Amino acid sequence: REGEGERVGEREKEKGEERRGVEGDKSSMYLYHLSLQKPTCVLQAVHGNFSSATAQEVVVGRGRTVELLRFDNAGKLTSVAAQDVFGLVRSLQAFRLTGGTLDYAVVGSDSGKIAILRFDSKRNVFEKVHEEAFGRSGCRRIVPGQYLAIDPKGRAVMIGAVEKQKLVYILNRDANAKLTISSPLEAHKGHTITYAMVALDVGFENPLFVSLEVDYEDPKLTRKLVTYELDLGLNHVVRKHQVLVDSTSSHLVPVPGGTDGPGGVLVCSHNVVTYKNAGYPDIEVRVPQRHGFYHPEHGLMIICSAMHKQKGLFFFLLQSELGDLYKVDLAYKDDIVEEVRIHYFDSVTPGNAMAVMRNGCLFVGSEFGEHFLYQFVRMDPAAHDYTLAEDGVTPLFVPTKLTNLIPVDKLDSAAPILDTQVITTPAADGVLQQIVGLAGRGGQSSLRLIRHGLAISEMAVSDLPARPNGIWTVKARSDDKYDKYIVVSFSNGTIVLSIGDTVDEVSDAESGFLSSTSTLLVALLGDDAIIQVHPNGIRYIRGVDQRIEWKTPGNRTIMHACANTRQVVIALSGGDLLYFELDDLGQLVEVGKKELGHEVACMDIASIVKGRQRARFLAVGDWNNTVRLFSLYPDELFDRLGLQGLKAAPKSICLLRSSLAGSVDGSRDFTGSQEQDELYLSVGLQDGVLLRTVVDPATGELTDTRRRFMGTNPVSLFKVHLGNSGVPGCGGTAMVVRSNSCWLCYNHQGNYAITPISYVPLESATNFTSEQCVSGIVGHYEASLRILTIDRLGEHFNQVSIPLRYTPRQMVVHPETGYAIVAEGDCKTVSIEHDKEQIEKVASMVGARIEQEKESTMDMDEEEDDEEDVQTICHAFARQQLPTDDPSWASCVQIVDPRKEEVISTLELGKGEGCFSVCLCEFAAQPGYTFVVVGSAKNVVMQGFKAEESYLTVYQMNPADGTLMLVHRTEVAHIPMALAAYHGRLLVGMGTLLRVYDLGKKKLLLKCENRNIPHAVRRIKVLANRIYVLDMSTSIHFVHYARSENRLDIVADDFVPHWMTSGDVLDYDTVAGGDKFGNFFVVRLPENVAESLKNDTTGNKRTLEQGYLNGAPNKLQTIASFHVGEVLTGMQKTSLTPGGSEVVLYTTILGAIGAFLPFASREDVDFFQHLEMHMRSEFPPLCGRDHLAFRSSYVPVKDAIDGDLCEQFAILDSAKQNKIAEELDRTPAEVQKKLEGIRQLIQ
């Protein structure tokens, strides 16, 4: 085994040298970083009118990105624009100047600057209006940026730090009506910690700001509500007054004032909400709490709030840490509040931010998991049967399912991702690469199956009598909203399906189609004429009476056909082209003929630009590996305008107008003018390559050809229309590409995207519209008709969520069955198996409440959802509301089948036992059997991370049903946090110990150990004979196991003390890692050290070597480093597509997915280095953080190029694009082609 391991190591080392990127330099590795999925969490959210006065929009902060969400025509939130700020968004607020119609966004970040942004709807990007520096960069406690408060009239903004500093800026307009900002006015107070800060509504009096502070020099640490007044006349800020508040106060909610309400502020403390207003008595109200959760010593915290205000009405929604919503309104008269009323409203997922929209929707940005959009169905909370707690004051309620809100939309989010692994599973198109990830916390935990591709909703599936060869949809009239027929062609006939409430087959007499032959094309001509092209002719159908049949001359056969709304071209056998046009009387007449002299492989005609009578271009693909572009204008009919040589025969052709996507001049205009659309010629080849070429509208010249390998099968192209989403730059005409799998080519936010479709590879596709499916696709796969919709454009990944029982800790995937084995555990949590009585008690109360509401709604004849699983709701609420007082744990091991997308087996561990690690191991003592080893501990105390007892438990899994059978349990000295299989034995990392175990009859047998791990083993990786130990705080250690001496030796370590969270082995001497501060790095064993270790066959040299810098005798070299900006929780060397380029794929705690791709040539390195340099100077980050400083936040960036910055080249104006392109000796189109090419290598 040892000799075999050395040979494997040598092979991996040779492969690694081939992947190192730049020829002749084995010590270098140049990487290209690209974010494949932006962070999906929502940390801040504000609503307003940012692009137009009537738009309903939300701006969300997602860690290092800001994104604008807007309601589309279907009433769902759609991403309009998302930009990376290359920093950390700490706070976000919106404001509007007095008399204005649009809102601005104010961002507090880690740049040490305040940034004011506006949204440019023409270019579809955020623009920086003002940027004022006030401190050092980074998230520092005394540098403002953590809190923002804006005067409701838009006159001033206060930005505050966690400690001491507060600054006030006055906002105004200049003579040109442009926003101006004053110099900062200081409102500092030393030795103070700020918990919250808001601006009071005082009408047009001097702006007032209140903050919740504590003086840490005060021995009692009493919290105070401090009011700051901005004197606009004297231009200074004063501390007006302060009052004591409850020591548990943590959240402030401003109350409308002036002419809209009484003013003041709501102070949210544990279990209490207090109304405060200067000069008026305080009014306190108790917060209702759940039955079973209330404990006097455990306070209930309010975590976020939202306010809705309209003329003569306002109310507040407060959310507790459990997710319960409370509606708060005030009874007041003459600006004097008489009563504060609070009622339980509904229960949703706990959120980081909420926003109540003017259209009656509530947006909740969740802490964990998906974000939801709810619709208010009623505003008055249902009467609840409150009971009083033991204190006689606190009202208690029983939660139930949603009664006042209904969910209308959901934004997918995997945050927080805790661990990931890429697996390959069988699929209809061969194999499927998917990321298996652990996400969430507690009752919101889940296993996510993240797949590269667009999410699909299947609307209908219907079996067909045979396998079709084509499908089309057609409307009865051009101005109809929905399609009337689905036409399905077979080899010997055609069926016509009528679209209505149901899809039914219709006869020839009713539809007018010829069903006795196969169909080559169906299209709508003019206003109300339909043509059916079949091998023997063309059938012209207009209404019920007019049906004209045109026969082919000389018994020749039509091989191919294409058409738009006024033109038809057919290709006959022998290679003749016939051209028809629709005349002024609505009749189809033959205009011209072209003899090619050879057979046609495929052809397509361009669509007609609005305002013109005909399209100019016809593309014809020949079997001699060429594509020719002909003119259809009368004065140049069938003149050849362009010619393109191919490396293989064409399979299909598509002439598609694609607005804004990769335009030659780089311009971006979202006004929706069709005159600005680019015409592209897409060619699918027999060898699986897709070509995309720009067609010059004046000369027909073919330029800027871009290639992409789609698969091993021939490429078929189908035009589809995705409908009008109401969001500029999204949707419109698109193209479905079919090879081994299906892809969709479409426009999103002004960029051209090619994204796989997570569905079976459709053999044909066209657009489909009906009352039930406004914008869909209909196609066929084998002998079945399928109608589907695309859930959300622009998302490169879709995910399936499988609920888990507790917080997932670690995961391993069984290589044979594909099962995911998940170790889960929660502290201070009720165990489902061991506390059934306690759970059932509360569950019965919830169930009774649901049944009571069910009866009441039935009495009112309201519609009831009979599919609601009452028991699931009961247990969900019971789990959330029963924390325990002692530090006991609840843990389990669950077996998940990713193919069936369900949990197939659950093993609950003993009461008080926490589960921390899991691995698969095949022991040499029992070859052929794979065991599941679980590391656990009993009564773990998080402070000091100690346990009463720790165990290694060995199970054997039944492959049939996934059940685990106990083999034996071994007690160990410390909590086992890392496990790994190693040549028939088990490697265990526990604290500072690294041990090797073998399988015994009654327990695991200790073989050897190393006690020199500096802090604590976080993870263990193995390749060949080498062991790679990821330490909690001292980076990576290379360990060698000398089997003959039965000894573990640390041969090398890193001199940079990274706090490790993830990592993976790239080759025998190279490891990539990520730490908790968001740094990605690659370290390598020096070549001379590697050769020395290879030649030391006896191990004596390793024994005699002295340590260096209080560590191992050898030090690793850092060959690449890059600051991602988020905690890296998963990392793996893999490829996203089978046969694609290998990348280092990573995931983050905020739900982002990214990749590092090694460069293959020095030319590419030089190009992207210069592009990155020019982008830094021409397009600085949005919030003012220096890009180079951000990417070097902890360690200087080295040999890594930021593709996220380079890809912002597409959103530059044309002048800057031309300037940068000239410096690079390229055109803007060539620069974008390089960016598109390197992205295709990753995706």
Image: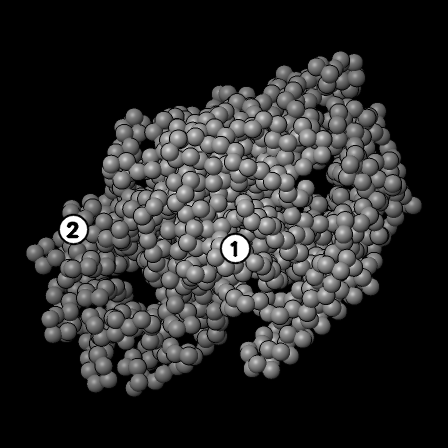
* Amino acid of disc 1: Ile
Label 2: state its secondary structure. Answer: strand
Residue at image point 64% right, 31% down: 215
Q: Which residue is nearer to you in this view: 483 or 597?
A: 483
> Which residue is identified by label 1?
336
Q: Is residue 527 above or below residue 604?
A: below
Is label 2 or label 1 in front?
1
Residue at image point 36% right, 26% down: 1177
| Residue 828 seen in render | yes
Q: Is residue 1234 above or below residue 302?
A: above
Classify the position of the N terminus by image quarter. Answer: top right
* Amino acid of disc 2: Arg
Count of numbered badges drawn on the protein:
2
> Which residue is identified by label 2?
640
Q: Is residue 731 left or right of residue 443?
A: left
Lower sequence index among marks 2 and 1: 1
Label 1: state its secondary structure. Answer: strand
